[in-house]
Image: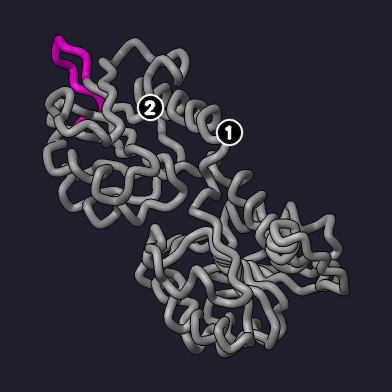
Amino acid sequence: MTDTPTTGTRPQVWMSLPPERIGPLPDAFTYVYWDGTQPDFPADPGEAVFYVVPYMQGPVAGALPLPHMRRVRVVQTLSAGVDHIAPHLGLLPPGARLCNARGVHEASTAELALTLVLASLRGIPRFVRGQDNEKWYAGFYPSLADKTVLIVGYGAIGAAVEDRLRPFECEVVRVARGARTAEHGPVHALDELHALLPHADVVVLTTPLTEQTRGLAGAAFLAAMKDGSLLVNVSRGPVVDTKALLAETESGRLTAALDVTDPEPLPSGHPLWHAPGVLISPHVGGSTSAFLPRAARLIRAQLSRFAAGEPLENVVATS
């Protein structure tokens, strides 16, 4: 099957961002706007050859048209992770490519990871509550300087986190699925993780959610962490075992800063809201002012390659 049909009508591209906000797009296609919030499809999804998945609409919305996309050649997510789409690959025609949004979220997610680390170590949540109650919480607080930071999931986002940590005079240890040498030093394999955890003051999770990483930060992982250390999760909520984390934070042995939770959104009354030493942000690692221009740049580039029959970037799986 060729990438673009040679019939008299222009093939459809389904866009989850308004085409006029993306900028100049190839004339080879008809553009259909659907952001996952409309109850009905604006056109026949069976005619789509390229599908840009809605961003931040949950795992169900983005997958809705997939069973009907009998001609789709490319499914382009606007998220770094593809765990919400990958399970549906079997519904697509053979050879359809799934692409992630590498290059869109690294800077924003790394910014937030560093923010969560610094805010937690330097006592910022306590100071905010103190300001609300007109209390002066003076004293000594932990510094990031001279700490050891373990990054688990050393891909593009993990490397961006390290780039932002480097001026803070801390040691960075890297872990990925397999061992290799990166620009700034060695990357350890995942099977070395439990030997590294006891030496880290801060553990930052930037791993994608896969069957291998689901529940990775479970009871054994957390028990191996150093007393008083900080767990930061900017990956996916299910990478952490919430029950096990609650046990460690409620005992006061560990602290945590979480941009993602399991369940998510975190419901009212959940004990994680009030667990001691836990800072929670509402999954905003990538949803910043940097998103739209970077997403638009990615979409333009991918569609230009697709129209020209050139290899796509960021291909993570093929049906």
- Looking at the picture, which amino acid does disc 2 mark? Leu
In the displayed structure, does residue 27 sit left or right of residue 246? left
Q: Locate residue 134: give its quadrant.
A: bottom right
Using the image as rendered, state which of residue 221 and residue 288 is in the foreground.
288
Residue 72 at x, y percent in the picture? 21, 34
Q: Residue at x 41, y 34 (%)?
A: 311
Q: Which residue is mark 1?
A: 289
Badge 2: how crowded within 10 Å, few (<14), some, or many (20+)? many
Using the image as rendered, state which of residue 203 and residue 99 is in the foreground.
203
Q: Which mark is residue 185?
A: none
Q: Main secondary structure of the magenta part?
A: loop
In the displayed structure, does residue 29 sit left or right of residue 111? left
Q: Indicate the quadrant containing the N terminus: top left, top right, bottom left or bottom right.
A: top left
Residue 17 at x, y percent in the picture? 38, 27
Q: Residue at x 22, y 52 (%)?
A: 88
Q: Residue at x 51, y 30 (%)?
A: 292
Secondary element under disc 2, as helix, strand or loop, is loop
- Looking at the picture, which amino acid does disc 1 mark? Ser
Q: Is residue 2 magenta?
A: yes
Q: Which mark is residue 17?
A: 2
Count of numbered circles on the image: 2
Q: Is residue 230 magenta?
A: no
Q: Is residue 85 above or below residue 228?
A: above
Magenta-tinted stretch: 1-11
Can the viewer see residue 69? yes
In the displayed structure, does residue 188 sit left or right of residue 50? right
Looking at the image, is mark 1 or mark 2 nearer the viewer?
A: 1
Can the viewer see residue 183? no
Secondary element under disc 1, as helix, strand or loop, is loop
Q: Is residue 252 above or below residue 274?
A: below
Residue 255 at x, y percent in the picture? 63, 76
